[in-house]
Image (tube, helix red, strand yellow):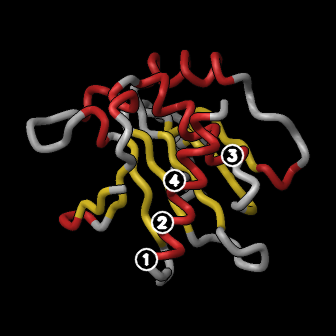
């Protein structure tokens, strides 16, 4: 676990996350974690075109949205990997480490095109804590996500 202070993110210490498909797989680990609740995954549409005057955001802002609480299955991992490669747009996962709270943890997976000299490919997936959590809670959440990822 590594904390990136400049943008308040916690990073995984896994070299394999330099690959786009593994970052998407980490998003699936987020969805399948038994220690997280109310998980959602959304992929932004890089080219929205459906603008309406009665909406703040374009109606096609998202290319894909999945909510664990709706009782449906997510698209297969291979389809989301393909969509991620085609769209080259971020995947945003959000959920909670507490069953009675709606949103406490966010994970963002960025496409390869976002890599820079200061942001290495393996750093293109990171976790942000949206509420104060102890270092022990952070470590437990990160360890659980890594374990879930490695077991997939």
Query: Which residue shows up at 33% across the image and 32% down it?
Result: 15
Q: Are marks 4 and 3 in contact (CB under 8 Å)?
A: no
Quadrant showing the C terminus: top right
User: Toward which corner of the image does residue 89 lie, by quadrant?
Assistant: top left
User: Mark 3 highlights which residue?
Assistant: 31
Of the residues tagged 4 and 3, which is closer to the observer? Answer: 3
Query: N-terminal of the two: label 1 or label 4?
Result: 4
Left or right: where does residue 63 sit relative to residue 76? left
**Classed neighbour count for the residue bearing mark 4: other residues with Cα under 10 Å, few (<14), some (14–19), many (≥20):** few
Q: From mark 1 to mark 4, how far is it between C-alphas?
A: 36 Å
The disc at residue 139 is 2
Q: From mark 4 to mark 2, how far is it between C-alphas?
A: 35 Å
Q: Position of residue 52 (x, y in %)?
A: 56, 48
Q: From mark 4 to mark 3, how far is it between C-alphas?
A: 25 Å
SS category of the residue bearing label 1: helix
Front residue of 71 and 17: 17
Query: Which residue shows up at 67% across the image and 51% down it?
Result: 40
**Classed neighbour count for the residue bearing mark 2: other residues with Cα under 10 Å, few (<14), some (14–19), many (≥20):** some
SS category of the residue bearing label 3: helix
Query: Which residue shows up at 63% across the image and 37% down it?
Result: 28
User: Toward which corner of the image does residue 74 lie, by quadrant?
Assistant: top right
Of the residues tagged 1 and 4, which is closer to the observer? Answer: 1
Query: N-terminal of the two: label 3 or label 1?
Result: 3
SS category of the residue bearing label 4: loop
Query: N-terminal of the two: label 4 or label 3?
Result: 3
Q: Are marks 2 and 1 in contact (CB under 8 Å)?
A: yes
Residue located farthest toward the right when viewing the structure as drawn: 71
Q: Are marks 1 and 4 in contact (CB under 8 Å)?
A: no
User: Mark 4 highlights which residue?
Assistant: 57
């Amino acid at each position: 676990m590594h904390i990136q202070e400049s943008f308040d993110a916690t990073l995984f210490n896994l070299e394999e996350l330099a690959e786009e498909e593994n970052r998407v797989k980490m998003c699936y680990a987020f969805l399948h974690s038994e220690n997280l609740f109310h998980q959602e995954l959304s992929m932004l549409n890089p080219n929205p075109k459906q603008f309406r005057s009665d909406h703040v955001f374009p109606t096609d802002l998202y290319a894909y949205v999945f909510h664990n609480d709706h009782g449906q299955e997510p698209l297969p991992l291979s389809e989301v990997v393909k969509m991620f490669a085609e769209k080259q747009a971020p995947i945003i996962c959000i959920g909670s480490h507490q069953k009675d709270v709606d949103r406490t943890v966010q994970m963002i997976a960025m496409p390869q095109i976002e890599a820079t000299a200061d942001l290495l490919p393996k750093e293109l997936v990171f976790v942000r804590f949206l509420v104060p959590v102890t270092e022990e809670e952070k470590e437990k959440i990160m360890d659980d996500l890594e374990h879930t990822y490695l077991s997939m």
